[in-house]
Image (tube, rainbow, N blue to C red):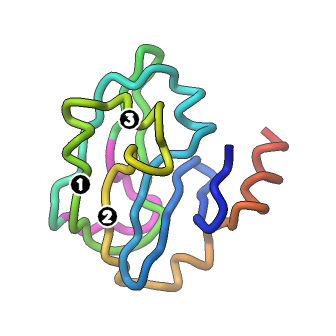
Amino acid sequence: MIAEGLLYTKENEWAKVEGQTATIGITDYAQEQLGEITFVEMPAIGKNVKQKDELAVVESSKAASDVYSPVTGKVTEVNSKLESNPELINNDCYGSGWICKVKITDERTMENLMDSKQYEEYLKGL
């Protein structure tokens, strides 16, 4: 499943941009590849990130995978529910399974992201 209205990276992260804030998570494709998610290492609130910087780490029964920031900005919030319920990413990756929120400081970085149709085409090539 690919959600409409989000922006996507080739590393399978998504960003929901509302004003200056991007809510970030991993895609349905990514969570399927990882399998059952067992732990999420969150970024520190206040951390400055550049696009493609490591933002978080998602661990599963199969592997650990880095989550990269789709935008340049500053982490303003993390999804603390994932500490006790990391499987929210498997169950609702585009909703309650979001990882963090970043205040965007360089809007030009969004030009490098794909919309849902572009991401769907990208996945067909994998």
Q: Quadrant of residue 46?
A: bottom left
Mark 2–mark 3 CB contact (< 8 Å)? no
Secondary-structure class at tag 3: helix
Q: Do the residues labelled 1 and 3 touch (CB within 8 Å)?
A: no
Q: What residue is drawn where x is 44% and y is 50%?
A: 95
Which residue position holds label 3? 88
For badge 2, the amino acid type reads Lys
Comparing 53 with 110, the one in front is: 110
Residue 50 covered by magenta stretch: yes
Asked if labels 2 and 1 touch by Cβ distance under 8 angstroms, the answer is yes
Along the line of sight, the residue nearer the viewer: 67 or 4: 4
Residue 36 lies, in percent from the top left, at 45, 20
Mark 3 belongs to which amino acid? Leu
Left or right: 92 as drawn, with respect to 30:
left
Residue 119 numbered tag: none
Q: Residue 78 carries which label?
A: 1
User: 10 Å neighbourhood of mark 2: few (<14), some, or many (≥20)?
Assistant: many
Pick whichever of labels 2 and 3 is earlier in the sequence.
3
Identity of the residue drawn at 59% across and 57% down: 9
The residue segment tinted magenta is 47-56
Question: In the rendered view of the protein, which quadrant contains the N terminus?
Answer: top right
Q: Which residue is identified by label 2?
A: 101
Between label 2 and label 3, give the one nearer the viewer.
Answer: 3
Vertical side of 10 occupied by 106: above or below: below
How far is mark 2 from mark 3, CA to CA? Answer: 16 Å
Residue 87 location, x and y as percent?
A: 37, 28
Residue beneath the point at 51% across and 21% down: 35
The amino acid marked with disc number 1 is: Val
The quarter of the displayed image where residue 115 is located: bottom right
